[in-house]
Image (tube, rainbow, N blue to C red):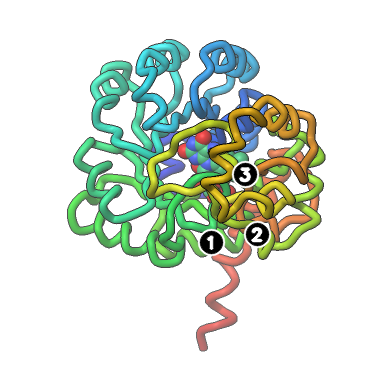
């Protein structure tokens, strides 16, 4: 089997699949595993701990990987971009904020710019900044995002790019966890996909196994967009973004009661961080998406990539003969 999309050609990869730069979860090992599996792995620098970033680039060994930032957070500590560029990332992946201030350095380092967007307005801003690749992220996605659904956002962005910026590549994200999702994304006009939740439930990802077990036991009804997990951690996200998490006891306690939560969160913060790190799932905000309903076990990342690629290939090759006379 040989995949040939604009993404595989541009990045020199054999499967059109990128690992989402999931903050704290997508470390060097999962990123390297996705690259070894034929896609391209990204380290998720999240809120930007410099020692963590250096450690995870070291953990990736000499695998070719990229790195992603939460853009509004990077704006508070812009020196982290130099630190990451010193590791010669395959690409820099910016989400959630204005990418423009960071473009000159990324260009000067000869790296590619990937911008994840949630709306048409974000897409226009990313194009104005000169993004090489746009990731259209639907609301099904795990982690932070907004309200547009993958099913309409991806083709609408595809039309926008076709009209005004035909050389910019397009990836779909949000709810893509198997070959059906990859094949559908290609049909919607994408050159490939970004996968988060499915690769979160892999052996390599830096996630407590209790959280993975709980998510895999639930179905796709069991997630919700909320800000309780940000209040608990003390992160002040722009109001247009919320985070999709597993509906745990913690979420049921605080979601919808934000004023009381803000009043209580500071004193509870250290305990909350320990609950997350030590795998007390019911006390935690566990970032993961609706795709939990499409998976039932923790796998090695390379096995996920192989299965997704093979299923998508079979669907793309076989379905037309079954649905067209
Ligand atoms: C645990 C988790 C953490 C995430 N952290 C980030 C992040 O730090 N930066 C980012 O750009 N996207 C982050 N995302 C969102 C992903 O980039 C991506 O859009 C999403 O995972 C795709 O949808 P899916 O989860 O249905 O595959 C995160 C997603 C998850 C599940």
Numbered badge on residue 311: 2
- The reply to whether dot 1 and dot 2 touch (C-beta < 8 Å) is yes
Where does the image place residue 273, in percent across and percent down from the top left? 68, 29
Q: Which is more N-terminal, label 3 or label 1?
A: 1
Where does the image place residue 61, in percent across and percent down from the top left? 62, 15
- Quote the CA–CA distance across marks 2 and 3: 26 Å
Residue drawn at x 39%, y 24% as measured from the top left: 74
Task: Judge by depth and name the residue closer to the eye, 285 or 24.
Answer: 285
Q: Which residue is mark 3?
A: 287
Q: Which is more N-terminal, label 3 or label 2?
A: 3
Label 2 crowd bin: few (<14), some (14–19), many (20+), radius 10 Å: some
Residue drawn at x 38%, y 41% as measured from the top left: 238
Q: Is residue 36 visible?
A: no
Query: Residue 300, relative to residue 124: is it above or below?
Result: above
Could you tell me which secondary element the residue under label 3 belongs to? loop
For marks 1 and 3, give the one nearer the viewer: 3
Label 1 crowd bin: few (<14), some (14–19), many (20+), radius 10 Å: many
Classify the position of ligand 1 by quadrant: top left, top right, bottom left or bottom right.
top right
- The reply to whether dot 2 and dot 3 touch (C-beta < 8 Å) is no
277 left or right of 146 in image: right
Query: Residue 133, relative to residue 215: is it above or below?
Result: above
């Amino acid at each position: 089997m040989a995949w040939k999309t604009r993404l595989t050609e541009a990045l020199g990869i054999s499967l059109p699949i990128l690992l989402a730069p999931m903050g704290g979860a997508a470390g060097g090992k999962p990123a390297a595993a996705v690259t070894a599996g034929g896609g391209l792995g990204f380290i998720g620098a999240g809120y930007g701990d410099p020692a963590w970033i250096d450690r995870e680039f070291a953990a990736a060994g000499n695998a070719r990987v990229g790195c992603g930032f939460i853009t509004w957070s990077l704006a508070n500590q812009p020196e982290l971009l130099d630190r990451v560029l010193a590791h010669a990332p395959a690409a820099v992946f910016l989400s959630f904020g204005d990418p423009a201030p960071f473009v000159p350095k990324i260009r000067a380092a000869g790296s590619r710019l990937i911008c994840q967007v949630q709306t048409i307005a974000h897409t226009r801003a990313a194009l104005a900044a000169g993004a090489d690749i746009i990731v259209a992220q639907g609301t099904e996605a795990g982690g932070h995002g907004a309200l547009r659904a993958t099913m309409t956002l991806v083709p609408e962005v595809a039309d926008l790019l076709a009209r005004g910026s035909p050389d910019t590549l397009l990836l779909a994200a949000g709810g893509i966890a198997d070959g059906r999702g990859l094949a559908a994304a290609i049909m919607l006009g994408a050159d490939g996909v970004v996968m988060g939740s499915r690769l979160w439930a892999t052996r390599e990802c830096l996630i407590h196994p209790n959280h993975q077990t709980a998510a895999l036991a639930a179905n796709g009804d069991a997630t919700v967009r909320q800000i309780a997990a940000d209040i608990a951690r003390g992160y002040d996200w722009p109001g247009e973004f919320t985070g999709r998490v597993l509906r745990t006891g913690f979420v049921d306690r605080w979601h919808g009661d934000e004023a009381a939560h803000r009043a209580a969160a500071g004193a509870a913060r250290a305990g909350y961080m320990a609950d997350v790190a030590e795998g007390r799932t019911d006390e935690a905000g566990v970032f993961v998406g609706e795709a939990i309903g499409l998976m039932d076990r923790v796998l090695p990342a390379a096995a996920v990539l192989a299965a997704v690629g093979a299923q998508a290939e079979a669907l793309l090759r076989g379905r037309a003969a079954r649905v067209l006379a």
